[in-house]
């Protein structure tokens, strides 16, 4: 698995999708999803200039990233997996962006940890666009009220929204729904699109794509 070569291909595909969609070059941020991958493979991506990474488990990230971050201070680490409340303090301490704010309890704990630690990770709210019972995320109908709670009651600065469409669905309508909810709330950033559908997501306005296997190989 040649991480450097894969990364080059993905970057070129992101640039082509930006062009095709009439988007500004460089307007889509590539998050390299390194979950389950060892530090030596992550170092290859760092050597190839990648600085933004995503992990889906707090504990796994704690075992890999403090050292990698110490070696490369301009790393930006995103949490893209569900956050358990007993891990909130650790997540606020380690991650630069938390993309999976998805319920009131977690939002309150994040607010408390931000006040306590004086560290302010960027925050995205995860929306369960397919209303899948087993999937994390706020229901689409409840999103506006939840965004309002986060901002006005908890004083959290929310950067944008994130979604993971149902595996079996055509992702386009889910991306369109996420964009619509964001626009109504005055949010500009959209984290959507993975290895199989990031080009579609870019056409629908993604500002962040989360790409794992196309860079690091199958898990
Ligand atoms: C694993 C994961 C990705 C990356 O998936 P690939 O299909 O490997 O690109 C993106 N987003 C989330 C939330 C993930 O858990």
Image (cartoon, grey):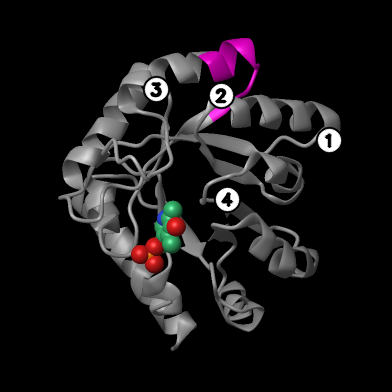
Q: Residue at position x 33%, y 40% from top?
A: 133
Q: Position of residue 85 (x, y in %)?
A: 66, 39
Q: Secondary structure at mark 3?
A: helix
Residue labelled with disc 2? 104
Q: Position of residue 169 (x, y in %)?
A: 17, 50
Residue labelled with disc 4? 79
Relative side of 112 to 38, left or right? right
Q: CA distance from mark 2 to mark 4?
A: 18 Å
Query: Quick check: marks 4 and 3 in contact, CB under 8 Å?
Result: no
Magenta span has 167? no
Q: Quadrant of the N terminus?
A: bottom left
| First-in-chain label (3 vs 2) | 2
Q: CA distance from mark 3 to mark 2?
A: 11 Å
| First-in-chain label (2 vs 4) | 4
What segment is highlighted magenta in the picture? 149-158
Mark 2 CB lies closer than 8 A to ligand 1: no
Residue labelled with disc 3? 143
Q: Residue at position x 23%, y 39% from top?
A: 174
| First-in-chain label (4 vs 3) | 4
Q: Secondary structure at mark 1?
A: helix
Q: Position of residue 78 (x, y in %)?
A: 58, 51
Magenta span has 155? yes
Query: Quick check: marks 1 and 2 in contact, CB under 8 Å?
Result: no
Mark seen at residue 117: 1
Mark seen at residue 52: none
Q: Secondary structure at mark 4?
A: strand
Label 2 or label 4, whichever lies nearer to me, is: 2
Q: Is residue 199 above or below residue 130?
A: below
Q: CA distance from mark 4 to mark 3?
A: 20 Å
Query: Quick check: marks 2 and 4 in contact, CB under 8 Å?
Result: no
Q: Residue at position x 65%, y 78% from top?
A: 39
Q: Is residue 86 above or below residue 31?
A: above
């Amino acid at each position: 698995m040649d991480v450097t070569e894969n990364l080059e291909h993905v970057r070129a595909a992101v640039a082509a999708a930006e062009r095709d969609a009439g988007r500004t070059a460089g307007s889509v941020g590539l998050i390299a999803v390194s979950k389950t991958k060892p530090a030596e493979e992550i170092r290859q991506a760092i050597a190839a200039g990648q600085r933004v990474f995503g992990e889906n488990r707090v504990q796994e990230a704690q075992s890999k990233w403090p050292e990698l971050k110490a070696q490369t201070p301009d790393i930006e680490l995103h949490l893209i997996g569900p956050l358990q409340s007993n891990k909130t303090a650790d997540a606020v301490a380690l991650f630069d962006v938390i993309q999976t704010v998805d319920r009131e309890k977690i939002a309150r704990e994040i607010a408390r940890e931000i006040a306590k630690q004086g560290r302010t990770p960027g925050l995205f709210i995860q929306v369960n666009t397919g209303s899948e019972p087993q999937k994390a995320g706020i229901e689409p109908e409840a999103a506006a009220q939840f965004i309002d709670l986060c901002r006005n009651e908890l004083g959290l600065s929310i950067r944008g929204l994130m979604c993971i469409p149902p595996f079996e669905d055509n992702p386009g309508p889910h991306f369109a729904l996420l964009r619509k909810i964001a626009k109504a709330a005055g949010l500009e950033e959209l984290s959507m699109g993975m290895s199989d559908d990031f080009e579609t997501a870019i056409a629908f306005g993604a500002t962040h794509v989360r790409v794992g296997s196309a860079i690091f190989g199958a898990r």
